[in-house]
Amino acid sequence: DTAVSQTPKYLVTQMGNDKSIKCEQNLGHDTMYWYKQDSKKFLKIMFSYNNKELIINETVPNRFSPKSPDKAHLNLHINSLELGDSAVYFCASAGGDYGYTFGSGTRLTVV
Amino acid sequence: GENVEQHPSTLSVQEGDSAVIKCTYSDSASNYFPWYKQELGKRPQLIIDIRSNVGEKKDQRIAVTLNKTAKHFSLHITETQPEDSAVYFCPTYSSASKIIFGSGTRLSIRP
């Protein structure tokens, strides 16, 4: 009954690999997000989808491709992983009241 | 464009004392001002929020005050306890889909 769930929680992979992180929310929210948090705790928005439509695409390399099959899911696929991609990635959803609900995060380590 | 400045970046207070974190925003259209708390290894969580038609809101030991003229809002924590140690974020919104978080304030409570 977790509101925003993302998998996996930890991901260790080699440079050059392709990986995906999945996110699902059961709150009925229309908007979902992906954030990247670096080692200094800087929390930066990457993408935002509203009802399956991309509405925010910040300056993120095109190796990162979000996919939203329906408004309850927003997955993140990363091609050709680099060392600098190591971070914690948070999925979040928001409803009409503007409040955010974050997932528990995916700690990605590229070696 | 929108910008948010949060001060201080780190704060250490004696247990039992008060802590104040200030957030300055630039977009006059901002109308929602939340504070998020992120404990070590966990997700950011909404702890208190305020809307532009209210000057102050309190919830037990935490309060948020808003000064629209000066374009800043502050988080006040009284009688601090060890569990208040965390990173605190003040994202600013101009619309539900445009949000800026930043690096937050790392609060440490000294025993």
Image (cartoon, coloured by chain):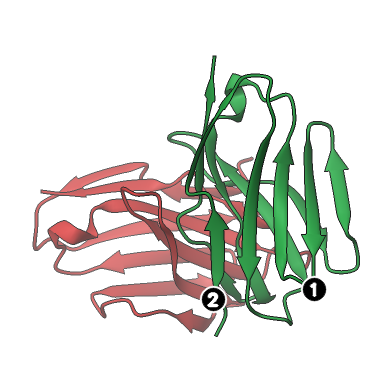
Location of residue B85 in the rendering, given as x and y in whole percent from the top left corner: 54, 30
| Placement of B96 over or under A5, stated as above or below | below
As drawn, the label of residue A49 is 2
The letter of the red chain is: A
User: Which subunit holds the residue at mark 1?
Assistant: B
Mark nearest the camera among 2 and 1 is 1
Q: Nearer the viewer, residue B51 or A67?
A: B51
| Placement of B27 over or under A77, stated as above or below | below
Question: Residue B107 vs residue A39: left or right?
Answer: right
SS assignment at label 1? loop
Question: Quadrant of the rendered structure where residue A72 is?
Answer: bottom right
Look at the numbered discs 2 and 1 and tell me whether their residues touch, using CB distance below 8 Å: no
Residue at left 18%, top 63%?
A18
SS assignment at label 2? strand
Specify the colour of chain B.
green
Q: Amino acid at mark 1?
A: Thr
Q: Amino acid at mark 2?
A: Tyr
Residue at left 61%, top 57%?
B90
Residue at which label 1 appears? B69
